[in-house]
Amino acid sequence: MFNTLQKWLPKIILSPSIFLVTVCIYGYVAWTGYLSLTHSRFLPNFKWAGLLQYNKLMENDRWVTSCINLLIFGVLFIIISIILGTLLAILLDQNIRQEGAIRTIYLYPMALSFIVTGTAWKWILNPGLGLEKMMHDWGWTSFEFNWLVSNDMSVYTLVIAAVWQSSGFVMAMFLAGLRGIDSSIVKAAQIDGASMPTIYWKIILPCLRPVFFSAVIITSHIAIKSFDLVTALTSGGPGYSSDLPALFMYTHAFTRGQMGLGAASAMMMLAGVLAILVPYLYSELRNREQ
Amino acid sequence: MATLDIKQLYKRYGKSAPNTLEDINISINAGEFLILVGPSGCGKSTLMNMIAGLEEITSGDICIDGKVVNDVDPKDRDIAMVFQSYALYPNMTVRGNIEFALKIQKMDKDARETEITRVAQLLQIEHLLDRKPSQLSGGQQQRVSMGRALARQPKIYLFDEPLSNLDAKLRVEMRHEIKKLHQRLGTTIVYVTHDQIEAMTLADRIAVMKDGQLLQLGSPSEIYNDPADMFVAGFMGSPAMNFLHCSVEQSEHGLMGSLVCDQQQQHQIPLPEHLGKYAGKSLVVGIRPEQITHVNPYKKDKPLVTTLNLKLGVLEPTGPDTIALVTLNGKEISCRLDPDKPATMGENLNLMFDLSSAVYFDPNNEQRIR
Amino acid sequence: MTKFSPGRIFIYSILVLFCAIYLMPLLVMLLTSFKSLPDIRGGNLLSLPEVWVFDAWFKAWGTACTGVTCEGVKGYFWNSFKMAVPAVFISTLIGALNGYVIAHWRFKGSNLFFALMLFGCFIPFQVILLPMAATLGKFGLANTTTGLVFVHVVYGLVFTTLFFRNFYVSVPGELVKAAKLDGAGFFTIFFKIMLPISKPIIMVCIIWQFTQIWNDFLFGVVYSGSDSQPITVALNNLVNTSTGVKEYNVDMAAAIIAALPTLFVYVVAGKYFVRGLTAGSVKG
Amino acid sequence: MRKFATLASTLALTSAINLAYAGEVEVLHWWTSGGEAKSVGVLKEMLEAQGHSWKDFAVAGGGGESAMTVLKTRAISGNPPAAAQIKGHDIQEWADLGFLSNLNDVAKAEKWDEVVPAVVTNVMKFNGDYVAVPVNVHRVNWLWANPAVFEKAGAKIPTTMDEFFVSAEKLKAAGIIPLAHGGQAWQDATVFEAIALDILGSEDYNKAFVMHDDAVLSGDKMVEVFTVFKKMRNYIDSDSPGRDWNIATSMVINGQAGMQIMGDWAKGEFIAAGKVPGKDFVCLPAPGTDGQFTFNIDSFAMFELSNADNVTAQKSLAKTILTPEFQEVFNLNKGSIPVRTDMDMSKFDSCALDSMATFKASNTSGDLVPSMAHGLATTGYVQGAIYDVVTNFFNDPDGDPKETVTKLARVVKAAK
């Protein structure tokens, strides 16, 4: 009897989580998927609408803008975070005095939410209050930094703030990766006459491929879910020029009483995640097995 | 001390997958030291895990002391195992590691102390008891992992390549220790290795496995001198047995096999008469390096002994012997030469082939011709 | 000790420059919190306060209005602890058990489950607000601290499982086998062997989860009850003035108070964070 | 506040009988700070004086957006608050879904129909039954100006759109920001609807934003509205995007800017800064909308509850909100006017009196129109669609009024 219990124990232990994941993630997603095919407005209802909401979504200029913004924001944010994180990690790995303190400084933005830092960021980026004014006060009057209030540039301010928040975490991941590399590899390369930049570029960074993988996964999940960031910084403005899908979804489903449309946009977001992530996951994991 | 019987054992992962183990039958007597050898992936570790109860049995039976234990939990089989990586619990001291199983058995504290002391003395690790595994050298970790197994006083010990992470000197030392331990305690041991010297020196019997099948089960000398097929013959012994493919002819001097050396010269070697039915066909002669030597006048006129003049290739002095490579039939053949007698690379030398203890195989199915 | 060559000086100056950039928002908040209101309107972001005043801090902690009550954020501060501590503890424990099963007690489908879970990381939380509300309502957990803890545990689970699984995969399977032969069962192995060696990854999980849960606003605002609102909600109420004078110094002081616990965790446990990441959680 | 404590205790005496059935009301609102929080505090005191307890559920942010999300999740979880700050069309939506409770008995006892104008009560009723209680009436089409600034620039405070642009030009020449504005969607819409009210007139305003008449929405007049709207952009400083409305107001207060088009809640900011109406600042109708009144009504909807004691408390709350005492305190604090037309207005300032007079007059002249920007004119979805078009046009330097009008008509139709 005890025997069988031992055999079933792993499954028993995992089953509540399996249940929760099935219901609270996939069940709810299915529910949302169903909702996106209904006429739901103010609250969910179950009047069948077919693909109506999706058609509406495709014709919605704001949705198109927010998708393009996500693409710009996501790509820039991921690339800059990873480059900056790698760079800082490499510099910090050079036997730096006070490494612990510097590391903490790079890492601390991760500890703060945009509910907390949003106001400070709005000030810093605002031309009349922040950086631009400060530079003018200090005598550099030609300094111009008005991205926050510019239609074309506001989405880049999101990138700045997001990179500020997450690059420290990426740095920590790469630092951890660097610490895990066998030092004999570096010695071997030095004996072969390679310069330090070459060693990093040709040997160490390729070794960190799994870290890149994790970093891409983590930063892309941050990018897709970015919501606090936009609400705190631009609320999607000026106009809706810095809108992102997460904000679009929230606004339509909860404040505008267009739950069906909101649900459809959520499903499109998930489909987008699947379309980009699954091939990447697949190729990465397959490469690693080889 | 216990007997271990493995009967018609099969292991398959998934319904359509090929058999990982196929029809394994081994009976191990109480107190016997059985060694499983074979190339990696032959299934020996799987077999070991199945004996321990760590993997499920697809079909067949495993019996300890005559009782089927197929569905018995690992912990209830009264088996101890020593792993290649030692698998010491990193969070516990040496004492904690040895004590762990005893605590689970709810042995009282005094008894545990006695047992730890006994094992520590036996393995000379008393001074290490309060250290963590990470503070120990490889050899010390090895001893602790044996100590952990010994403390339980199980019916059967399983050793999974326990020495392969040690350096050569330590490996020899530990080998002796294990041998002594076995002689002193007389327990049943199943031991997996790919090191054939370990196999030869430690085993009461050796089981040679390949591709999930048991090829031969026998005493070390049986395995060495009387291999069942080319695989077993080639696997045991270092340098490995030489295989000479030759065509068989009936000549006036009796049955002869013909060979070609690297100077395109034809050579003939005598073959025993019972191979007569292979005349006109070809077979494989298996001859160990120690049967190819300098000319020994004492043996010279014996039957099935012949001398060939061959060009020496690379020489490898090992101390007690010098291994010389010569090319025959386009393959390198190793010979064991007396280091005291002169021999230089490139020199043509008369080598004596003693075919009286050679073995013969059918080239088609690689089975022994008896 | 390494000598200060031009190259080293270059490295140090870059590192210090980035320190300044990273610290700027915090510095702005700190300076502002010590300024008086006229001082804020007059000076610029990084100018030092003309007079250092601490009133804003006392007001934020004890007397600022966040609705009809004007007792500052102190009550909400404890609400957040009451929610975060159990949620972090439970999600870490379950994550550890899950990771242990997925890494060492594999069974048919356990890997599939893991893959499905990974995808769960990417779901925007807005999607699950309503169905989760309905679920909580059915179980009578709506607008209770328990319900809030439950929500955080469910969606934190995905991450903790991921962390622990990646860590436990790097623990040799032979350790588990050895323990099984020593007679240890599922839980004995977990509590006596796996958990004691998991300290680095437990630290990572605690830091990650604590930060996420403490900083969460969305779940906090929709699933809390009126007497269990977390500090992020209070902060939001304080900062989003609709009428009246905006007291930036109080807002900033409150924001820093709200951030103190997470900052503390990062400063104190930051070194374990990198160590824990090194120990395996980044190896995907 | 002391006065209200005594007032509350007299109220407590009159309703002492209710003490036996003391219940609890949970109130969801987004009045979290400053004068609003204090006003709600008064309501709390008055209710507590009647023996009930008040559970405060305040969620600030974005004009109630977060609060609405909370309300929806709470309704779905089957645990709605007793009262929630809901307004305009949303009341109908909630009532239609069957969440709201019937307040007819309170309304009858308190004679709401007699003291509150029909324009207001219509919003509070669903199928003829009271489901919500109005708190106040805001006039949205106000222009707030700093006379000192105008004097300095030698400009006249404008009453028509043409004057507006003349004055704005002068202010600009004097180095003053003519119009203080916060670039948030609802503020853009507030300015937009003021212009629309002027150019379209009350009738077409209603046709466009209440009836969604395609001809008006895509008509030439609407093109003109957008053209003027775009022109106004030139008199706003470039830092406006994202700015909160009260920051914009403070720009007018400290003379950085000349004027602001904003609802009467802006008055609270002036008062809080110690400014006197008529002297330090002036309030007058948004250019060209004299005699017209864009109304925005704050209200509390009452949710269906199961606990009988709590229902009693809820009804007490409904009753208390419409008492002249509360109406007076609250509206003095908030800058708005009472919903009761039978009140003694002696404590109110000139702006409020002016507002009240226009409210009563426009009620009969047909110039009383619901605010689109504040959700009184139409459903949340149409409002949102209009917001998108308006705010995008306003912030897009290349926005073309003609194209935008076509787009407006299209999205309104799609959202309907």
Image (spheres, grey):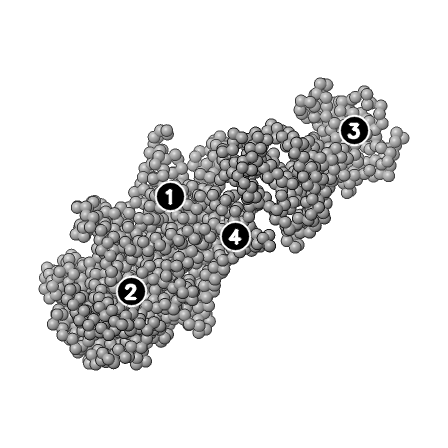
Select label 2 or label 1 by which is in front: 2
- SS at circle 4: helix
Q: Chain of mark 3?
A: B
Q: Is there any visible trace of residue D122 in the rendered image?
A: no
Distance (Cα) linking label 2 and label 3: 109 Å
* Mark 3: secondary structure: loop
Q: CA distance from mark 2 to mark 1?
A: 39 Å
Which residue does the numbered mark 1 point to in the structure image? C269
**Residue C27 point in image, percent of width and height:** 26, 46
Label 3: which residue? B265
Crowdedness of circle 2 by 10 Å Cα count: few (<14), some, many (20+)?
some
Q: Amino acid at mark 1?
A: Ala
Q: Nearer the viewer, mark 4 or mark 2?
A: 2
Give how far across and how far down residue A76 sits, in percent. 39, 51
Of the residues shown, which amino acid type is indicated by label 2? Lys
| Residue, far right | B252
**Inter-mark Cα distance, 1 to 3:** 78 Å
Q: Which residue is label 2 attached to?
A: D55
Are discs 4 and 2 both within one chain? no
Chain under disc 2: D
In the image, residue D117 above or below residue D265? below
**Residue B357 visible in the current orientation:** yes
Pointer 3 and pointer 4: residues touching (CB < 8 Å)?
A: no
**Mark 1 vs mark 3: in front:** 1
Residue sitting at x 58%, y 37%: B151
Q: Which residue is mark 4?
A: A282
- Dot 2 falls on a residue whose secondary structure is strand
| Three-letter residue code for mark 3 | Gln
Q: CA distance from mark 4 to mark 2?
A: 52 Å
